[in-house]
Amino acid sequence: MRHITLLGLWLVSSLAVADPSVIRVKGEATTEVPPDFVQVDAIVYAEFPTVAEAKQAVDKNAREVIKALKRFKIEQQDLAFSGIAVQRRVEYERGNNEKTVGIAANRTMTIKLRELARYELLMEALTRAGVTEIRSPRTGVDDPIILKTRALKAATQNARKKAEEIAAGLGVQAGAPYEIGEEQLPSQIPFQQRMAGRADAEMMRSFGAASVKDFEPLFFVPENITVSATVWVSFKIEG
């Protein structure tokens, strides 16, 4: 008799926690904003017979770069400078003997440019100032969390709309959400540029170009930064 009573209680408890009838849908959305900045790594490099000469040359070029950046009104928080890196350059003679042929030194400057229309002018200024390599041009936003939040909100709205459409087709209603799960997709940060028909005359004059033939840069035209979000939502069926 005791065994039957316990079994009956287990059945009642199981029914009480059983999942209700639900509609499970996938909500998807993509949100986008224009980039706030374009960021590049500019490297100055020099190779001389001695460490002192190599360092002196790199420091001189770095100062020229800093001077060139002033016309772009880049804030201090948008600039980062690495320490100088020095490496011995060697060649191998007969017998596998090492011979030092020079000392290479370099310094990297990470630059965020917020006036995107002046990107090509910045590239020109950097190369004229002595930058030997420009790496990793990439666009970004100051607060990517806001972009993700917008995408998630739009995805949940999409899920609700889908559930209501499915419920209407079945002659019932989609009630309160019963279970929610999120799947965040990575940001897409494209980097594109196109040829301009003609460079802006005022911008060229600021560079000292006498005519269009002297300097006609490409215009940097970045695409918007996008973030996609996916959510899975189960809605209770009502009616």
Image (cartoon, grey):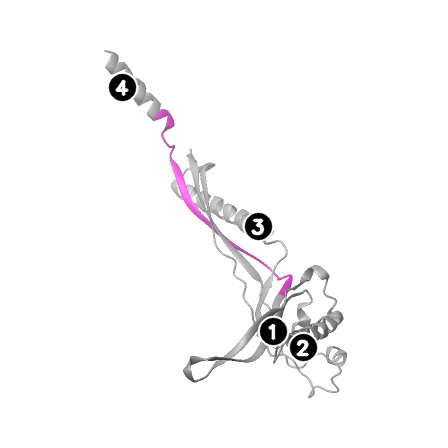
Quarter of the image for the C terminus: give it.
Answer: top left
Tell me which amino acid carries mark 4: Leu
Can you give x and y, in whole percent of width and height, for residue 227 in the image? 53, 56
Residue indicated by mark 2: 57
Camera-side residue of 219 and 131? 131
In this picture, residue 144 sits left or right of residue 63: left
Q: Are marks 2 and 1 in contact (CB under 8 Å)?
A: yes
Q: Which mark is residue 65?
A: none
Tell me, yes or no, whether the highlighted magenta stretch contains residue 18: yes
Q: Residue at x 35, y 22 (%)?
A: 13
Q: Which mark is residue 7?
A: 4
Which label sits in the foreground, 3 or 2?
Answer: 2
Q: Are marks 3 and 2 in contact (CB under 8 Å)?
A: no
**Distance from the alpha carbon under mark 4 to that under mark 1:** 80 Å
Quarter of the image for the N terminus: give it.
Answer: top left
**Distance from the alpha carbon under mark 3 to that under mark 1:** 45 Å
Whichever of callouts 3 and 1 sits on the residue coming sooner in the sequence is: 1
Q: Residue at x 66, y 75 (%)?
A: 52
Residue indicated by mark 3: 150
Tell me, yes or no, whether the highlighted magenta stretch contains residue 54: no
Residue indicated by mark 1: 105
Assess disc 3: are there few (<14), some (14-19) or many (≥20) residues with their C-alpha within 10 Å of its C-alpha: some
Assess disc 4: are there few (<14), some (14-19) or many (≥20) residues with their C-alpha within 10 Å of its C-alpha: few
